[in-house]
Amino acid sequence: MLQDKHPDNDIYLPFVKSMHNILSAAEQSGTVKRIVFTQAGAAMVHPNDGDTLGTDMNMPLNEHTPVHSGLLPLKPPFASPHHAYCAAKAQCMTILKNLRASGKAPFSIVQVVPGTVMGPSELISTKIEARNKMDRMSRALLFNEPKPRYLFGFVHVGDCARVHVEALDKVKITDDEIPDWFIAAASSDNAKSGEQTWKEAGNAIERNFKDEIASGTLTVGRDNVPTNMPFYVDSVLTETKILGHDKFKSLNECLKIIAEWYKDLA
Protein backbone atom coordinates (compact mmCIF):
# COMPACT_ATOMS: atom_id res chain seq x y z
CA MET A 1 0.00 0.00 0.00
CA LEU A 2 1.20 3.51 -0.86
CA GLN A 3 0.42 4.81 2.64
CA ASP A 4 2.84 2.32 4.21
CA LYS A 5 5.83 3.75 2.34
CA HIS A 6 8.13 6.66 3.20
CA PRO A 7 7.24 9.52 0.83
CA ASP A 8 10.80 10.53 0.02
CA ASN A 9 12.90 7.38 0.37
CA ASP A 10 10.42 4.77 -0.87
CA ILE A 11 8.49 6.69 -3.52
CA TYR A 12 9.85 9.95 -4.90
CA LEU A 13 13.60 9.32 -4.96
CA PRO A 14 13.39 5.75 -6.36
CA PHE A 15 11.02 6.88 -9.12
CA VAL A 16 13.22 9.75 -10.22
CA LYS A 17 16.50 7.88 -9.86
CA SER A 18 15.25 4.82 -11.73
CA MET A 19 14.20 7.00 -14.66
CA HIS A 20 17.63 8.62 -14.83
CA ASN A 21 19.33 5.22 -14.46
CA ILE A 22 17.32 3.80 -17.37
CA LEU A 23 18.15 6.78 -19.57
CA SER A 24 21.84 6.57 -18.67
CA ALA A 25 22.05 2.80 -19.25
CA ALA A 26 20.25 3.10 -22.58
CA GLU A 27 22.59 5.84 -23.76
CA GLN A 28 25.69 3.93 -22.70
CA SER A 29 24.53 0.77 -24.46
CA GLY A 30 24.60 2.47 -27.84
CA THR A 31 22.04 -0.01 -29.20
CA VAL A 32 18.72 1.03 -27.64
CA LYS A 33 16.38 2.56 -30.22
CA ARG A 34 13.24 3.24 -28.14
CA ILE A 35 12.14 3.17 -24.51
CA VAL A 36 8.54 2.86 -23.33
CA PHE A 37 7.80 4.30 -19.89
CA THR A 38 4.65 3.56 -17.86
CA GLN A 39 3.21 6.67 -16.22
CA ALA A 40 0.03 7.54 -14.28
CA GLY A 41 -3.03 9.75 -14.37
CA ALA A 42 -2.10 10.80 -10.82
CA ALA A 43 0.27 13.29 -12.44
CA MET A 44 -2.75 15.26 -13.65
CA VAL A 45 -4.22 15.99 -10.20
CA HIS A 46 -2.93 17.71 -7.07
CA PRO A 47 -3.23 16.00 -3.66
CA ASN A 48 -4.10 19.33 -2.06
CA ASP A 49 -7.41 19.22 -3.93
CA GLY A 50 -8.46 16.43 -1.59
CA ASP A 51 -11.74 14.79 -2.52
CA THR A 52 -13.17 17.78 -4.37
CA LEU A 53 -12.73 16.59 -7.97
CA GLY A 54 -16.20 15.09 -8.28
CA THR A 55 -17.52 12.39 -10.57
CA ASP A 56 -18.76 14.42 -13.53
CA MET A 57 -15.96 13.13 -15.80
CA ASN A 58 -16.11 16.40 -17.73
CA MET A 59 -12.40 16.90 -18.50
CA PRO A 60 -10.62 14.99 -21.29
CA LEU A 61 -7.81 12.58 -20.52
CA ASN A 62 -5.93 12.24 -23.78
CA GLU A 63 -2.49 12.67 -25.34
CA HIS A 64 -2.65 16.44 -24.74
CA THR A 65 -3.79 16.48 -21.10
CA PRO A 66 -1.07 18.32 -19.16
CA VAL A 67 0.43 17.27 -15.89
CA HIS A 68 -0.66 19.45 -12.97
CA SER A 69 1.68 22.44 -12.94
CA GLY A 70 1.48 22.68 -9.17
CA LEU A 71 3.32 19.36 -8.85
CA LEU A 72 6.43 20.44 -10.76
CA PRO A 73 8.11 22.59 -8.05
CA LEU A 74 7.50 20.11 -5.22
CA LYS A 75 10.60 18.56 -3.63
CA PRO A 76 11.33 16.45 -0.52
CA PRO A 77 10.34 16.37 2.22
CA PHE A 78 6.81 15.54 1.07
CA ALA A 79 3.66 15.94 3.13
CA SER A 80 2.37 12.46 2.29
CA PRO A 81 3.02 9.41 0.08
CA HIS A 82 0.30 10.71 -2.25
CA HIS A 83 2.16 14.01 -2.69
CA ALA A 84 5.37 12.13 -3.42
CA TYR A 85 3.74 9.81 -5.96
CA CYS A 86 1.91 12.53 -7.89
CA ALA A 87 4.97 14.81 -7.93
CA ALA A 88 7.34 12.04 -9.03
CA LYS A 89 5.08 11.05 -11.91
CA ALA A 90 4.46 14.64 -13.05
CA GLN A 91 8.13 15.56 -12.92
CA CYS A 92 9.34 12.39 -14.65
CA MET A 93 6.73 12.79 -17.38
CA THR A 94 7.81 16.39 -17.94
CA ILE A 95 11.52 15.54 -18.06
CA LEU A 96 10.90 12.78 -20.60
CA LYS A 97 8.55 14.93 -22.67
CA ASN A 98 11.15 17.71 -22.86
CA LEU A 99 13.97 15.28 -23.63
CA ARG A 100 12.00 13.76 -26.49
CA ALA A 101 11.14 17.20 -27.86
CA SER A 102 14.77 18.32 -27.71
CA GLY A 103 15.91 15.55 -30.06
CA LYS A 104 19.09 15.15 -27.99
CA ALA A 105 18.48 11.55 -26.88
CA PRO A 106 19.98 8.84 -29.13
CA PHE A 107 16.70 6.91 -28.83
CA SER A 108 13.00 7.75 -28.99
CA ILE A 109 10.79 7.89 -25.91
CA VAL A 110 7.16 6.77 -25.61
CA GLN A 111 5.11 7.39 -22.47
CA VAL A 112 1.99 5.36 -21.70
CA VAL A 113 -0.65 6.42 -19.16
CA PRO A 114 -2.81 3.38 -18.27
CA GLY A 115 -6.09 3.37 -16.46
CA THR A 116 -6.61 0.91 -13.61
CA VAL A 117 -5.31 -2.41 -14.91
CA MET A 118 -7.97 -5.12 -14.59
CA GLY A 119 -7.98 -8.81 -15.42
CA PRO A 120 -7.17 -12.38 -14.40
CA SER A 121 -3.72 -13.57 -13.37
CA GLU A 122 -2.33 -16.96 -14.30
CA LEU A 123 -0.21 -16.81 -11.14
CA ILE A 124 -3.30 -17.02 -8.91
CA SER A 125 -5.07 -20.32 -8.25
CA THR A 126 -7.51 -19.69 -5.36
CA LYS A 127 -10.47 -17.42 -4.73
CA ILE A 128 -8.94 -16.05 -1.53
CA GLU A 129 -5.74 -15.00 -3.27
CA ALA A 130 -7.67 -13.59 -6.24
CA ARG A 131 -9.86 -11.42 -4.04
CA ASN A 132 -6.91 -10.17 -2.00
CA LYS A 133 -4.90 -9.17 -5.08
CA MET A 134 -7.71 -8.00 -7.36
CA ASP A 135 -7.76 -4.34 -8.38
CA ARG A 136 -9.87 -2.01 -6.25
CA MET A 137 -12.38 -1.23 -9.00
CA SER A 138 -13.25 -4.90 -9.45
CA ARG A 139 -13.46 -5.52 -5.71
CA ALA A 140 -15.77 -2.56 -5.26
CA LEU A 141 -18.14 -3.69 -8.01
CA LEU A 142 -18.00 -7.48 -7.59
CA PHE A 143 -17.82 -7.73 -3.79
CA ASN A 144 -19.23 -4.42 -2.58
CA GLU A 145 -15.92 -3.54 -0.93
CA PRO A 146 -15.12 0.11 -0.08
CA LYS A 147 -15.08 2.45 -3.02
CA PRO A 148 -11.75 3.57 -4.52
CA ARG A 149 -10.60 7.13 -4.03
CA TYR A 150 -9.58 7.82 -7.65
CA LEU A 151 -10.41 6.47 -11.08
CA PHE A 152 -8.55 7.55 -14.22
CA GLY A 153 -10.13 5.04 -16.58
CA PHE A 154 -9.66 1.26 -16.76
CA VAL A 155 -7.89 -1.18 -19.05
CA HIS A 156 -7.80 -4.96 -19.44
CA VAL A 157 -4.36 -6.33 -18.58
CA GLY A 158 -3.99 -7.88 -22.04
CA ASP A 159 -4.81 -4.60 -23.77
CA CYS A 160 -2.40 -2.74 -21.52
CA ALA A 161 0.42 -5.17 -22.27
CA ARG A 162 -0.28 -4.95 -25.99
CA VAL A 163 0.00 -1.15 -25.96
CA HIS A 164 3.40 -1.29 -24.26
CA VAL A 165 4.80 -3.94 -26.60
CA GLU A 166 3.48 -2.49 -29.84
CA ALA A 167 4.57 1.02 -28.87
CA LEU A 168 8.13 -0.23 -29.44
CA ASP A 169 7.40 -0.67 -33.16
CA LYS A 170 9.22 2.18 -34.91
CA VAL A 171 7.54 1.32 -38.21
CA LYS A 172 4.00 1.42 -36.81
CA ILE A 173 4.75 4.59 -34.83
CA THR A 174 7.55 6.66 -36.31
CA ASP A 175 9.54 8.96 -34.06
CA ASP A 176 7.82 12.07 -35.38
CA GLU A 177 4.37 10.61 -34.62
CA ILE A 178 4.93 10.11 -30.90
CA PRO A 179 2.58 12.28 -28.79
CA ASP A 180 3.22 13.53 -25.28
CA TRP A 181 1.69 10.27 -24.03
CA PHE A 182 -0.54 7.48 -25.22
CA ILE A 183 -3.60 6.73 -23.06
CA ALA A 184 -4.07 3.01 -22.40
CA ALA A 185 -7.68 2.84 -21.25
CA ALA A 186 -11.12 2.33 -22.72
CA SER A 187 -12.66 5.53 -24.07
CA SER A 188 -15.49 6.94 -21.96
CA ASP A 189 -18.90 8.09 -23.05
CA ASN A 190 -18.50 11.75 -22.11
CA ALA A 191 -22.27 12.12 -21.94
CA LYS A 192 -22.29 9.91 -18.83
CA SER A 193 -21.18 10.71 -15.31
CA GLY A 194 -19.23 8.44 -13.01
CA GLU A 195 -22.43 7.49 -11.22
CA GLN A 196 -24.11 6.43 -14.47
CA THR A 197 -21.07 4.44 -15.58
CA TRP A 198 -20.86 2.65 -12.25
CA LYS A 199 -24.55 1.83 -12.03
CA GLU A 200 -24.56 0.44 -15.58
CA ALA A 201 -21.65 -1.80 -14.65
CA GLY A 202 -23.55 -3.03 -11.59
CA ASN A 203 -26.61 -3.74 -13.71
CA ALA A 204 -24.52 -5.76 -16.16
CA ILE A 205 -23.08 -7.86 -13.34
CA GLU A 206 -26.59 -8.61 -12.09
CA ARG A 207 -27.71 -9.70 -15.56
CA ASN A 208 -24.73 -11.95 -16.19
CA PHE A 209 -24.19 -13.53 -12.76
CA LYS A 210 -27.59 -14.12 -11.16
CA ASP A 211 -26.63 -17.49 -9.67
CA GLU A 212 -23.36 -16.21 -8.22
CA ILE A 213 -25.15 -13.26 -6.62
CA ALA A 214 -27.88 -15.51 -5.23
CA SER A 215 -25.26 -17.82 -3.68
CA GLY A 216 -23.29 -14.93 -2.19
CA THR A 217 -20.22 -15.54 -4.34
CA LEU A 218 -20.60 -12.01 -5.72
CA THR A 219 -22.17 -8.93 -4.10
CA VAL A 220 -22.81 -6.05 -6.46
CA GLY A 221 -21.33 -2.71 -5.35
CA ARG A 222 -23.42 -0.53 -7.63
CA ASP A 223 -23.17 2.49 -5.33
CA ASN A 224 -19.42 2.29 -4.63
CA VAL A 225 -18.64 5.08 -7.06
CA PRO A 226 -15.02 6.27 -6.76
CA THR A 227 -14.76 9.58 -4.94
CA ASN A 228 -12.78 11.37 -7.65
CA MET A 229 -13.59 10.78 -11.33
CA PRO A 230 -12.74 14.10 -13.02
CA PHE A 231 -11.74 12.80 -16.47
CA TYR A 232 -13.42 11.12 -19.38
CA VAL A 233 -10.98 9.01 -21.36
CA ASP A 234 -10.26 9.72 -25.02
CA SER A 235 -7.97 6.96 -26.28
CA VAL A 236 -8.83 7.20 -29.99
CA LEU A 237 -5.22 7.99 -30.91
CA THR A 238 -3.94 4.91 -29.05
CA GLU A 239 -6.56 2.67 -30.65
CA THR A 240 -5.77 4.06 -34.09
CA LYS A 241 -1.99 4.17 -34.01
CA ILE A 242 -1.13 1.27 -31.70
CA LEU A 243 -4.09 -1.13 -31.72
CA GLY A 244 -4.79 -0.92 -35.44
CA HIS A 245 -8.29 0.48 -34.82
CA ASP A 246 -9.14 -2.30 -32.35
CA LYS A 247 -11.09 -1.10 -29.32
CA PHE A 248 -10.08 -1.43 -25.70
CA LYS A 249 -12.28 -3.82 -23.74
CA SER A 250 -14.98 -1.92 -21.87
CA LEU A 251 -15.50 -1.87 -18.10
CA ASN A 252 -18.39 -4.32 -18.44
CA GLU A 253 -16.29 -6.69 -20.56
CA CYS A 254 -13.42 -6.55 -18.06
CA LEU A 255 -15.73 -7.26 -15.13
CA LYS A 256 -17.35 -10.20 -16.91
CA ILE A 257 -13.95 -11.73 -17.66
CA ILE A 258 -12.79 -11.24 -14.06
CA ALA A 259 -16.02 -12.61 -12.53
CA GLU A 260 -15.94 -15.71 -14.73
CA TRP A 261 -12.30 -16.32 -13.86
CA TYR A 262 -13.01 -15.84 -10.16
CA LYS A 263 -16.00 -18.21 -9.99
CA ASP A 264 -14.00 -20.98 -11.69
CA LEU A 265 -11.08 -20.81 -9.25
CA ALA A 266 -10.64 -23.51 -6.63
Image (tube, helix red, strand yellow):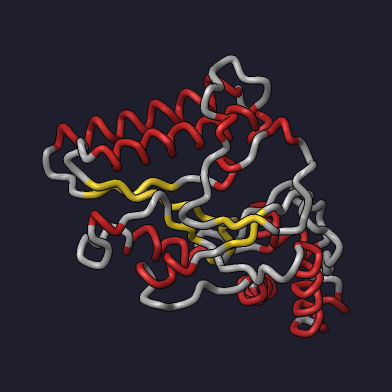
In the foreground, 61 or 209 = 61
Tell whether 107 sits left or right of 113.
left
Residue at 49% x, 60% y is: 184
Quick one: quadrant of the N terminus?
top right
Q: How many marks?
A: 0
**Quick check: 235 above or below 7?**
below
Residue 254, x across and y down, in percent: 61, 71
Residue 62, x across and y down, in percent: 51, 57
Residue 36, x across and y down, in percent: 34, 49
In the foreground, 241 or 161 = 241
Query: Which residue is situated farthest in the top direction here?
Result: 77
Tell whether 183 sits left or right of 174.
right
Query: Which residue is situated farthest in the left direction here?
Result: 30
Residue at 50% x, 65% y is: 235
Quick one: quadrant of the C terminus?
bottom right
Q: Quadrant of residue 77?
A: top right
Tell whether 167 sits left or right of 42.
left
Residue at 15% x, 32% y is: 28
Residue 173, x across and y down, in percent: 27, 63
In the foreground, 125 or 172 = 172
**Quick check: 34 above or below 122?**
above
Tell whether 132 sits left or right of 29.
right
Q: Quadrant of residue 87?
A: top right
Residue at 18% x, 45% y is: 32
